[in-house]
Image (tube, rainbow, N blue to C red):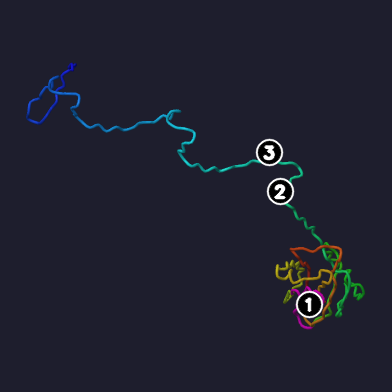
Amino acid sequence: MNSLFVLPILIKPGIPPQHLTAPLLTDTDTFYTQIITVGAVTLTPALFSESDTFYTHVLSIQQFLVSSLFVETDTFFTPTVVPLVSLVPDADQALGFWEDELGATTDVFQSIDEDTPNDSDYIISPALGGSSADLIVRLLEGSTEIVEWTHTNISTSLVTTTQILSPLEFAAITDFTNLFIEFEDKSGNIYRTSISDPLVTVAEPFIVRYRYRKIVS
């Protein structure tokens, strides 16, 4: 073989450099073992086929509603609309010496049957002994008590009270056409009026609202 250049190689410290010439080396001589670091690999058709699998992918699908995906007749949910209804006193069931603002004892319920409170008409209990006044209000189904609210030491200031039945109390009602409201004073005098309306559907929340105060004569 022909020698194109002379390569100086330091063999060992302290020994002068030696020169390798063509007669001193052959094609099979090994001077070092190389380490090859592979750089970026470019995939070409010759390196893979359609059946090769390089990774398993996970698809996360995001959808958008556009006019072409649905029509007006499509149903996404079924709405339930419950209208707000009012059950107001409609007949006297027990007077218990209660009377209206004019002192009448006939059709007393008409003084408390308005949907929007009107302070010009009201019902009043008999005169009470002592200086304190208490009031018990009950919601009944027939003769069965559903819930009771007690107010003690009532003042002369008008108070508006809103009572909301709990789910358990509401579930205890089985016949909404047989409901009554009772007002009982400190002496045990009870006025009862029906509040039933067979033409309406009652749903939660069931609210009882009333106003009261003590009258000092």
Residue 155: x, y in percent?
74, 73
Residue 89: x, y in percent?
85, 69
Rounded to the nearest angstrom, the CA distance separating label 2 from label 3 is: 14 Å
Pointer 2 or 1: first along the chain: 2
Quarter of the view holding residue 107: bottom right
The label shown at residue 144 is 1
Report helix, strand or loop for mark 2. Answer: loop
Going by the image, does 7 lie left or right of 134?
A: left
The residue located at (31%, 33%) in the rendering is: 37
Rounded to the nearest angstrom, the CA distance separating label 3 from label 1 is: 56 Å
Q: Which residue is mark 2?
A: 76
What amino acid is found at the position of numbered circle 1 in the picture? Thr
Q: Is residue 117 above or below residue 143?
A: above
Q: Which residue is mark 3?
A: 66
What amino acid is found at the position of numbered circle 3 in the picture? Val
Q: In the picture, which quadrant includes the N terminus?
A: top left
What amino acid is found at the position of numbered circle 2 in the picture? Phe
Q: Is residue 79 above or below residue 17?
A: below
